[in-house]
Amino acid sequence: MPTEQTYNIPIRFRKMENLHIVFWLFKDISWCMIWRPLGIAMIFPTLIIAIIISIRTRQYMSEVCHNVAIVFWITANAYWMTSEFFHFDTLIVYGHITYKYLAIIPFSIGILLLAYYYLVWKPMHKNFVETM
């Protein structure tokens, strides 16, 4: 019978991840309610904690890929929110492309990173066990 792998997160990391969720929710609620100062202010702790989490998990390929994808997700999300707050979201960049659509760049980087992990790295390291 194979032994089951466990994934353990130190409590201090878990507390930071939970606080990260609180900041993220405040950022998105502020966006929804058009509370510009709070929304802009919440970008920084949300992004900084996501970067710290990524750095702390850098030795585990699975974790770092997902956490860096989250950094790019937050970046795209924050840019999109900012474009709406400052009313440049509907301005034309080229053709029918508006500034809001530039958020696709960091979103795509996150997707490409996860595609690399699942389609390239993970199949090449089938027998590699990551533990935390």
Image (tube, rainbow, N blue to C red):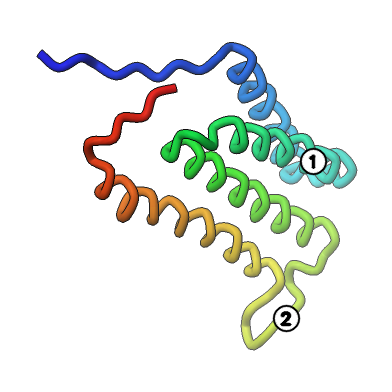
Q: Is mark 1 on a helix, strand or loop?
A: helix
Up/down of 57 relative to 102, above or below: above
User: Which residue is more in the foreground, 87 or 132?
Assistant: 132
**Residue underneath mark 1:** 44
**Which residue in the protein does label 2 denote?**
92
Question: Which of the two residues, 10 or 25, is positioned nearer the viewer here?
Answer: 10
Badge 1, how many Cα within 10 Å: few under 14, some, many 20+?
some
**First in sequence: mark 2 or mark 1?**
1
**In the figure, 88 relative to 38: above or below?**
below
Extreme residue toward the right, this view: 37
In the picture, the quarter occupied by the C terminus is top left
Q: What is the quadrant of residue 79 in the picture?
A: bottom right
What secondary structure is found at the residue carrying circle 2? strand
Q: Which residue is drawn at 82% across and 56% down?
A: 85
Q: Where is residue 29 in the image (x, y as percent from the top left)?
A: 72, 37
Q: Please state which amino acid type lies under the numbered disc 1.
A: Phe
Residue at left 75%, top 45%? 31
Q: The N terminus is located in which quarter?
A: top left
State which quadrant residue 55 falls in.
top right
Task: Give me the disc on residue 98.
Answer: none
Q: Extreme bottom residue here? A: 95
Q: Is residue 22 above or below residue 48?
A: above
Location of residue 47 in the rendering, given as x and y in whole percent from the top left corner? 71, 41
